[in-house]
Every structure is written in structure tokens, then in C-alpha cells.
Amino acid sequence: MKIKTLSLIEHYISWHYGQAYSDIYHVWTNFIWFFFNFFSIKLLFSTLLSPWKRMGEEYPAGFDIGRAAQTWVVNVLMRFVGAGVRLIVIAVGLSFALLAFLLGLVVLIVWTVMPIFFVALIISGFSLIIYG
């Protein structure tokens, strides 16, 4: 019985500080990957200066400086609107990715100290039972 208990503890410690870290890392990177792809951060950066929803005006066929200037202003305004909305979505996406990264660090720290904390709680419980 004593040998099996020691073997169980040995297997648990090797799993907890070995394979579990690999699994936590994969889940952690999957969350970060999800936020980068859910918010399409790479695509939004590559289309940052594109017009908002492809809105814009066609330039006039003839030479009309007033109409060409008006079309240019509208097209530039739509590019600024598109850039503004895309920057907001990029900021939200990066915030979620950063939050996932920080929570992953917290999970790693808690996972590392959890067995020590668990043993300390057991010892504390026994000392309360014995010494009141």
C-alpha cells in the first residue's frame, strides 16, 4: 500500500509539473490565437487605410474642379472613418489578447504553487484538529 501511494504521488508530481504545463501552454496560446483571429487583427492592419465599408464616390468624368475636390474630401473622410473604426476594433482585440496573456500568467503561477498550498492546508487542518 505504501509503495502504491508513493508511486501515485510521484506520478502526480511528474504530471503536474510536466505534462500539465504543456497542456496549459497549448490552451493559453489557443486563447491568444482565438482573439487575434476573432478580431481579425492582421486583416484590419492590412486594410487600415481602406474606406469604411468601401463607401466613396466616383470621380466625375469631365473636368470639374469643384466636384473633384468634393469627391476627394468624401473619399478621404471615408478612409479616416474606416481607419478610426478599425483602430478601435484593433485596440479591443489587442486588449482581449493581452488579458488572455495576463490571465495565462496567473494560471501558471497558481498552478505552480497549488500543490504546496494544498499540503499547507492539510497540515494546518491537522494542527487545528490536534491543537484545537
Image (cartoon, grey):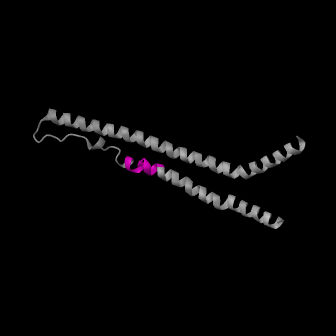
Q: Which of 57 and 116 is in front in this view?
A: 116
Rendering coords of residue 94 (x, y %) = 48, 44
Rendering coords of residue 75 (x, y %) = 25, 38
Rendering coords of residue 1 (x, y %) = 82, 66
Q: Which of 57 and 119 is in front in this view?
A: 119
Residue 100 vs residue 117: left or right?
left
Write down the quadrant of residue 66 in the picture.
top left
Residue 52 vertical placement versus 114 (above, below): above
Name the residue furthest right: 131
Image point 41% across, 39% down: which residue?
Answer: 88
Quick check: is 13 in the magenta stretch? Answer: no
Q: How many discs appear? A: 0
Indicate the quadrant containing the C terminus: top left, top right, bottom left or bottom right. Answer: top right
Q: Which of 124 and 1 is in front in this view?
A: 1
Write down the quadrant of residue 10 in the picture.
bottom right
Quick check: is 43 in the magenta stretch? Answer: yes
Image point 32% across, 37% down: which residue?
Answer: 81
Residue 111 vs residue 118: left or right?
left
Q: Inspect this view and state whether residue 51 appears.
A: no
Residue 72 vs residue 113: left or right?
left
Image point 50% across, 46% down: which residue?
Answer: 97
Q: Inspect this view and state whether residue 16 appears.
A: yes
Q: Nearer the viewer, residue 60 or 132?
A: 132
Residue 46 vertical placement versus 91 (above, below): below
Image point 58% across, 56% down: which residue?
Answer: 25
Q: Give the range drawn in magenta.
A: 35-44
Rendering coords of residue 112 (x, y %) = 69, 52
Q: Main secondary structure of the magenta part?
A: helix
